[in-house]
Image (tube, rainbow, N blue to C red):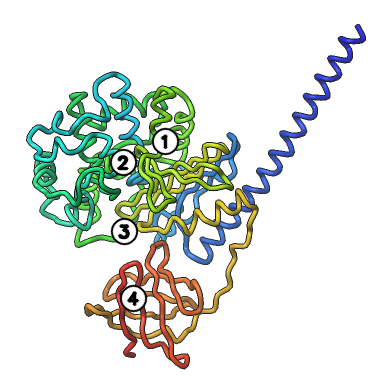
Amino acid sequence: MKKIISLILVIVLFSSNLAYAQKINSAENVKLGNNLDSFINYLVEKEKFNGNVLIMKGGETLVRKSYGYKDSEAKLPLSVEDKFLIGSVTKEFVAVSILQLEEKGLLDTKDKLSKYFPDYKYGNDMNIENLLIHNSGLKDIINRTSLFSNTGYIDAKDEDIYLNIINSELNFKPGEKYEYSNTNYYLLSLIIEKITNTSLENYLIENIFKPLDMQNTGSLKAGQKDVNISPNPVLINLTIDEEIGLVSKSKGAGYLYSTLDDLYKWDRALYTNKLLKAESLNKLITPVVKINGLLNNAYGFRVREDKSYARKVYQNGNTIGFTSSFNRYIDKDISIILLTNIGEYDVNNFMNPVEKIIFNNNLNYRKTVAINENVVGEYVTFPKIYFKIIKKDGNLYFKLGDFKDSFMFPVNENELSMVNTKVKLRFNASDNIITSVKISPYNIVGIKYK
């Protein structure tokens, strides 16, 4: 009897200690969540950040919140249930679909493309895996600055786009090197449709979205109104409806929309065998191509290793007026999902400080920078583009022709960054007089003339 009583006491004490540990852990997570929210609000205040954020740790919510507006001019706030285009995060779903079909014996990732596209002259030179890991050599023609910047393709059909692809020369011999190309995932979409005799959209609905109850995820369609299309995306001589029409044709390269909660369901499923067997899951996230000794490319994902978090499996997406980032720290059970309704957002500007806060408890992100206000004035670049840096309401703005003024925030006293983009202007001065400017990442140089 004494032994039984002692055992009961041990169990009670252990349970009490476990409950206390869980409370401590939850309290720590609350503090961490507050620190993360404070940082994101700092971005809102200083850099006009706009979007939805979900950060989860061990099943606990650190941040699930909207920041900013659907329409900044109308002051219409975002909601955490809002749908966003996810761009290249779409590729993750295509990669899983390919592996599902491989499990069923309907294809092999080593299959030559000639098996599916017998009229393609390079079909015997590359296989499905080359497409999955972006070392096929295929030109990237499924993007706005090439194929989809041409209004002539608004009414293009699949066969028109396919003919454009197979009639293009390769950039390099398949397998020779890595080069990201949306065309790879367009062809993977066609392979899925050939094998299943249905559209990629229907395949995803039946084999991924329905099983995971992802009711707010789907493919963009021309004229669709329930997706949170930004009222001011960066357009290339096209209306918003025309750009939506073009994106809808990109298939598995980037035509899906989703929400924070649906993408978290996707994240959770990738820890289970609900979609793929363990062997295929491992294949999905095992790097095949190493880039610059740091970045590894797997099937539909990129993989990064770091001593603070071990492995990060992720993908970023960018499309008309939208940027997304889907990050899984699989050894720490941490998920970070970022959805913004502004295109060309510099994801690293968000992710690097967030990772430092989570993994290093580093809260040193607040910068007080005084820009040299002599940057205000008029500039001309080579080739000839005229623009102004103006000051209003105490802030600096980039003004180009009749386009809407773009807010700029200081990186240091001689460098400005355009809000929510990767565009930076670095100014050169002589005796405190601004003489010239360099615009990155485009390596455009200009001079100040007024």
Residue furthest to the right = 2
Q: Secondary structure at mark 3?
A: loop
x and y percentages locating residue 449 in the rendered image: 32, 89
Q: Which circle marks residue 3 in the picture? A: none
Earlier-in-chain disc, 4 versus 3: 3
Q: Which residue is mark 3?
A: 233
Q: Which residue is mark 2?
A: 133
Q: Which residue is mark 1?
A: 285
Earlier-in-chain disc, 1 versus 4: 1
Compared to 268, does 235 lie above or below? below
Q: Are marks 1 and 4 in contact (CB under 8 Å)?
A: no
Compared to 350, does 378 lie above or below? below
Earlier-in-chain disc, 2 versus 3: 2
Name the residue type under label 3. Answer: Pro
Earlier-in-chain disc, 1 versus 2: 2
Name the residue type under label 2. Answer: Ile
- The image quadrant that residue 83 belongs to is top left
x and y percentages locating residue 215 in the rendered image: 38, 31
Label 3 neighbour load within 10 Å: few <14, some 14-19, many 20+: some
Q: Are marks 2 and 4 in contact (CB under 8 Å)?
A: no
Label 2 neighbour load within 10 Å: few <14, some 14-19, many 20+: many
12 sits left or right of 159 in the view: right
Q: Are marks 1 and 3 in contact (CB under 8 Å)?
A: no
Q: Residue at x 29, y 19 (%)?
A: 104
311 sits left or right of 141 in the view: right
Q: Real-space Cα distance between discs 4 and 3?
A: 16 Å
Q: Real-space Cα distance between discs 1 and 4?
A: 43 Å
378 sits left or right of 82 in the view: left
Q: Real-space Cα distance between discs 2 and 3?
A: 29 Å
